[in-house]
Image (cartoon, grey):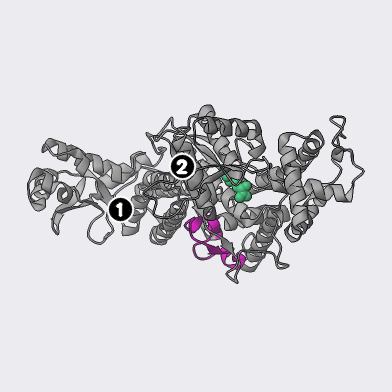
Amino acid sequence: MIPLRVEIEQVLQSAFGRLGYDAAYARTVRSNRPDLCQFQCNGALAMAKKVGKAPREIAGDIVALLVDDTRFSRVEIAGPGFINMTLSDTYLASYGSQSAHEEPTWDSTGKTVVVDFAGPNVAKPMHVGHLRSAIIGDSLQRLFRTVGYNVISDNHLGDWGTQMGMLITELQRRMPELPYFDSLQTEGFPETPPLTIHELETMYPEASKACKEDPERMKEAVEATDELQRGRPGYLALWKHFVALSTETLHRDFSRLGVHFDHWLGESFYMDRMGRVVEELTRDGFVYESQGAQVMDVSRPDDSKEIPPVMLEKSGGGFLYATSDIATIEYRMKEFSPARICYVVDKRQALHFEQVFRAVRMAEIVSHTVSLEHVGFGTVNGKDGKPFKTREGGVMKLAELMDLVINRAAERMEESGIGRDASEEEKNEIARMVGIAALKFADLSNHRLSDYVFDIDKFSRFEGKTGPYILYSAVRIKSILRKVQAAGFSSGEILPFRHDSERDLLLELGRLGDVYEKAAEDCAPNYLCDYVYDLSQVFNRFYRDCHIMKEADTALRGSWISLCQWTLKTVEDVLSILGIVVPEKM
Ligand code: ARG
């Protein structure tokens, strides 16, 4: 299925070509004045200077070629030289009949994109920022796959930072008798971890607090981290336990959220590469010493704001966040040869990525044909406008958050009588789907760069631009189609329209491929949310006008059924990209 806009653009391209004009100017867009026309081409204005003709004259030539074309019901010159086009209903209907059962087609097939997202830190609680990254990143990986990319998704775990040293030194205080702290012991460490995940999770905030308050303890933690990074056997054995405990919970949480990763290559995966990368950068003359640390200058003479040097190695040894990201890029280029690498990370890390991207370009680790993109996002705030926390002021765990939205969804269903006839088990399953839909849709429907307020009451409403509303609309189409089937009615060719809303629905359905493409280009899942919401609204108008079950004209009824099926397929496809599953019933 080719978007309607593209079909029309092709018609214009050939008209431009026939007149000896450059077809690149035939760019056609959806009209922003649907009261005047459906599509518009402004190429005549753009090319006027080049060909030395008045824009209205060029537009006139094109219009003259198209007026008799039966695909158009109206083609006219408007204003200073716009070409305004409205399609004939016969053409629209035949486009619909052909496209309703086809998948969208793409030409970006074959390119590889790496999507780096979630990236929670081992042993530290995962906060709503990581959740946001997980939800946005997951929808982007699905979108990229849909438009034909070869996608590699990677959960870049923070498993090699100072929190590890904090935990090691904290545990040593609590259980000094454990063998891990003996610097002389190099093997024979216990197979089973000395603590549970719950103990690990409660230990971290205490360790972190102690380090913040006491510089001596922070120093100890940093030293332990350096020793770990240098490969001290006892620390490595302990670290392995920490990582294993943490990743087990993470796997469970992400799978409950329906988020998948191809790889879980944390920072530690690059431990050997980091040293090598710094050596190579030093050999190539990029690195100099600054207050004992090894740094790389990435500033440019034309910088409008100051870009500080990237710190690659601390004065006492030990690598940093930037070092691991540079080593990671080097690995990804060698291993995957991507055309794009997208980092779905908090927008407050913009400077970090600017520095890292500059460093790898200067060092020619990445060529200019590869696009490195920091897909930043804003903060999730509480109703008080401050970053979202639990009522007690702590970080809310992902599992707790999911319970919260699912419970709220169940309450809402109860209030509005949704799921009334379902069994207890079915009700729970629907509540789970509605809750997750509420959470994901709320997050994805905001432009990723904007901050938003985490308001479960608002997200879980069945009215307005919410996940539950969209699900409800989709389930309603399913139930219409079930009734249709039970009555033995069948779908048919799409016919020219009795009501305006049929045409509106078709025009909306004909946009799908364009929406995907633009969303993939801008890494903007919110375009998909806007689209699926608009589509649901248009469908509701169509359904109000077209009484499928009462219609006596079987051909027209068949046409309406086809429009219903096409809408359902489109809604389900878009929602599945957003990571939202539609229940059978509600
Ligand atoms: N662990 C990091 C954090 O919590 C996010 C990692 C993002 N990915 C990356 N390649 N730097 O802030």
Question: Where residue 422 sits: x, y (%)?
Answer: 67, 56
Cα–Cα span, label 2 and label 1:
56 Å
Q: Secondary structure at mark 2?
A: helix
Q: In which quadrant of the rendered image does the C terminus lie?
A: bottom right
Q: Secondary structure at mark 1?
A: loop
Residue 495 highlighted magenta (yes or no)? no
Question: Where residue 544 sits: x, y (%)?
Answer: 41, 62
Q: Which residue is mark 1?
A: 497
Name above or below for residue 530 compared with residue 223: below
Q: Nearer the viewer, residue 177 or 87?
A: 177
| Residue at left offset 64%, top offset 39% | 267
Q: Nearer the viewer, residue 282 or 544?
A: 282
The residue range painted magenta reads: 441-468
Q: Is residue 222 left or right of residue 355?
A: right
Q: Earlier in the sequence, mark 2 or mark 1?
A: 2
What's the amino acid at mark 1? Phe
Q: In which quadrant of the rendered image does the N terminus lie?
A: top left
Q: Which residue is mark 2?
A: 358
Q: Residue furthest bottom?
A: 384
Q: Residue 491: which quarter of the image?
A: top left
Q: Residue furthest right?
A: 177
Q: Residue 273: which quarter of the image?
A: top right
For residue 67, say whether it is visible.
Answer: no
How would you rate the neighbour count of disc 1 (Cα within 10 Å): few for under 14, some for 14-19, many for 20 or more? some
